[in-house]
Image (cartoon, grey):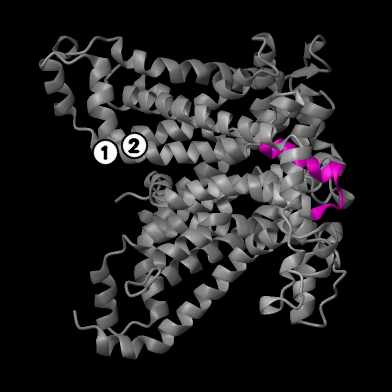
């Protein structure tokens, strides 16, 4: 077999070399290093000691860590129940053969996801201001009962984040749903139509099973992405290093970042990161098991 | 092609769908419209009007109140021109090199048989689950040892090996580059480098343009990496410089939004021009077909 090849054994490695060099130095090695750090106690670069599972044990009794976990889980649940229906709903609206201007709508809905998080933080920190903010004054103009001093950022931290992230990413996930919907065989829908199925029945029994694989991928993307929520709350509440009022904006990754870069406790930061990684891998495997069962 | 009767029957639903789509499109666009209006207002007018200041002019708008003053301040009084150049530099050099490295790597992984190929693929793609912030600290350490902290190179090098990019090119090449073309080119005595640049790259051209924009926009928008890895203010890109206005000019909303507009406009333009490639590149990994 080996001799029948026309290229030398080195050829693939020559093509892989530039990628692998950068990858090893800035992703591979840092990953290994952070795993080592997770079992060490570090305060500054010079003083390190192997401490076994101490960092992980400390996490169990660290109230800030659990606040961060609570906020992150709450955000994730809210993100799933808002973003997925919004993205799928928009895709269903756009997925009509006779629709004019579909590409224009697709571009419009997708456009917010081009905006960088630093800029989203600027836009939403101003739009969500009390009284002078665009959102409160618009709502007050439409519904006079709406309080123009509604304290979005000061008190309703989660709704503020959900609102910004919904604007930011509904269109992003929509394009995946739209691509999947366009692959649903038209004959299946026509057949269901002829059999007298209602639009809901057609969606439930024809469309949904067909787009199931993509729905599963999006679900995984939304969950793992939401678990890593960091830059947006960190920047929206950057005067308090991402804590927000009563630590309501503190997420797991924000806490990791604070412990690593603010307190210099690299060991604890790495332990938090690796625990999060394990949870994410666990969720991905769990979902794979569940979807395989569904298919059987 | 005689949809006339069918279309008439569909009308109420179709109309409702257009109304819904128009409503959601309006909601999506409002923040942009509001931002553009805010950017051409004075600091005082910002608080007295939602969009454009009212006045006796055409359409009831005080056109003479509108001003480009905020842009003048950004480009004359603030380090925005330099930051703009920095962003263009990072994003263009970084995305070209990342695309090249990913295309080469994807080719190496997908079109050759070698021991450990599967393990290598799994190891690289497996890193996508690692939270980005986890790698920041050891990466800073590595850059420190290499003497690359506060150097442009320290921003580029870590951005050149995105696992997602490698995955996209690996998929594209598995699906669309036939092995027998490569073999017959080799039989004809074509060199490996020439095969890659003259045969393989042209086949995956749509993925190249897609990934160029995807990584350009990602690098342009990156805030955390330059914020940590660069210390000199004159090296910072737009994301860091414009966000710093929030702390420096706390109530100068028109200035901040004008800065945001300046920062968003170039990538928006790029996206509008190349949206088809961009979206198909993104979705090609997840949706087969």
Residue at image mark 2: B171
Residue B106 seen in the figure: yes
Quadrant containing the N terminus of chain A in the rendered view: top left
- Residue B109 versus residue B32 in the image, above or below: above
Cα–Cα span, label 1 and label 2:
6 Å
Asked if residue A182 lies in the magenta stretch, the reply is no
Provide residue A275's location: percent of width, then percent of height: 67, 34
Q: Residue at x 54, y 56 (%)?
A: A111
The chain that hosts pointer 2 is B
- Secondary structure mostly seen in magenta is helix
- Residue B125 versus residue A102 in the image, above or below: above
The chain that hosts pointer 1 is B
Depth check: B13 or A295 in front?
B13
Provide residue A10's location: percent of width, then percent of height: 30, 9
Quadrant containing the C terminus of chain A in the rendered view: bottom left
The magenta region covers B237-253
Q: Are marks 1 and 2 in contact (CB under 8 Å)?
A: yes
**Which mark identifies residue B175?**
1
Task: Please rate how many residues cluster around mark 1, counting C-alpha atoms within 10 Å: few if below 14, some from 14 to 19, many from 20.
Answer: few
Please indicate whether residue B20 sits to the left or right of residue B7 in the image: right
């Amino acid at each position: 077999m080996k001799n029948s090849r026309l290229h030398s054994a080195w050829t693939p490695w020559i093509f892989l070399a530039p990628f692998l060099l950068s990858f090893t130095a800035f992703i591979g090695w840092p990953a290994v290093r952070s795993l080592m750090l997770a079992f060490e106690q570090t305060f500054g670069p010079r003083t390190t000691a192997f401490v076994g599972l101490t960092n992980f044990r400390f996490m169990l009794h660290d109230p800030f860590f659990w606040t961060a976990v609570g906020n992150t889980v709450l955000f994730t649940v809210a993100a799933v129940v808002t973003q997925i229906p919004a993205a799928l709903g928009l895709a269903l609206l756009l997925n009509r053969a006779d629709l004019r201007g579909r590409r224009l709508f697709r571009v419009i809905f997708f456009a917010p996801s081009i905006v960088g998080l630093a800029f989203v933080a600027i836009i939403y920190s101003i739009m969500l201001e009390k009284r002078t903010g665009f959102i409160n004054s618009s709502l007050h103009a439409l519904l006079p009962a709406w309080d123009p001093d509604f304290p979005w950022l000061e008190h309703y931290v989660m709704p503020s984040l959900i609102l910004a992230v919904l604007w930011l990413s509904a269109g992003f996930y929509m394009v995946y749903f739209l691509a999947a919907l366009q692959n649903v065989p038209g004959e299946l829908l026509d057949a269901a139509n002829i059999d007298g199925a209602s639009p809901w029945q057609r969606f439930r029994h024809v469309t949904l099973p067909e787009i199931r694989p993509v729905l599963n991928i999006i679900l995984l993307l939304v969950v793992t992405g939401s678990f890593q929520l960091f830059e947006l709350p960190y920047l929206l509440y950057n005067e308090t290093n991402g804590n927000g009022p009563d630590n309501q904006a503190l997420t797991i990754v924000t806490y990791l970042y604070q412990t690593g870069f603010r307190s210099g406790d690299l060991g604890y930061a790495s332990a938090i990161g690796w625990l999060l990684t394990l949870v994410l891998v666990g969720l991905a495997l769990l979902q794979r098991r569940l979807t395989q069962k569904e298919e059987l | 092609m005689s949809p006339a009767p069918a279309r008439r029957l569909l009308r109420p639903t179709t109309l409702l769908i257009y109304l819904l789509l128009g409503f959601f499109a309006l909601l999506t666009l409002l923040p942009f419209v509001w931002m553009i209006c805010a950017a051409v207002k004075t600091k005082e007018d910002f608080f007295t009007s939602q969009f454009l200041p009212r006045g006796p002019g055409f359409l009831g708008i005080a056109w003479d109140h509108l001003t480009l003053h905020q842009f003048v301040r950004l480009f004359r009084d603030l380090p925005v021109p330099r930051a703009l150049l920095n962003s263009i530099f990072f994003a263009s050099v970084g995305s070209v090199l990342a695309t090249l490295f990913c295309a080469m790597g994807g080719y190496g992984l997908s079109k050759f048989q070698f021991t450990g190929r599967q393990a290598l693929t799994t190891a690289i793609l497996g890193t996508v689950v690692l939270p980005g912030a986890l790698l920041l600290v050891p990466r800073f350490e590595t850059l420190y040892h290499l003497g690359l902290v506060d150097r442009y190179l320290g921003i580029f090098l870590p951005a050149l090996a995105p696992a997602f990019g490698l995955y996209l090119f690996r998929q594209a090449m598995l699906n669309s580059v036939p092995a027998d073309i490569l073999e017959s080119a080799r039989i004809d005595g074509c060199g490996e480098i020439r095969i890659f640049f003259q045969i393989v790259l042209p086949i995956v051209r749509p993925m190249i343009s897609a990934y160029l924009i995807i990584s350009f926009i990602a690098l342009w928008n990156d805030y955390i990496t330059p914020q940590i890895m660069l210390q000199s203010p004159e090296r910072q890109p737009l994301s860091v410089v414009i966000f710093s206005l929030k702390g420096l000019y706390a109530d100068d909303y028109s200035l901040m939004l004008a800065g945001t507009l300046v920062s968003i406009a170039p990538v928006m333009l790029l996206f509008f021009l190349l949206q088809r490639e961009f979206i198909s590149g993104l979705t090609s990994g997840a949706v087969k077909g």
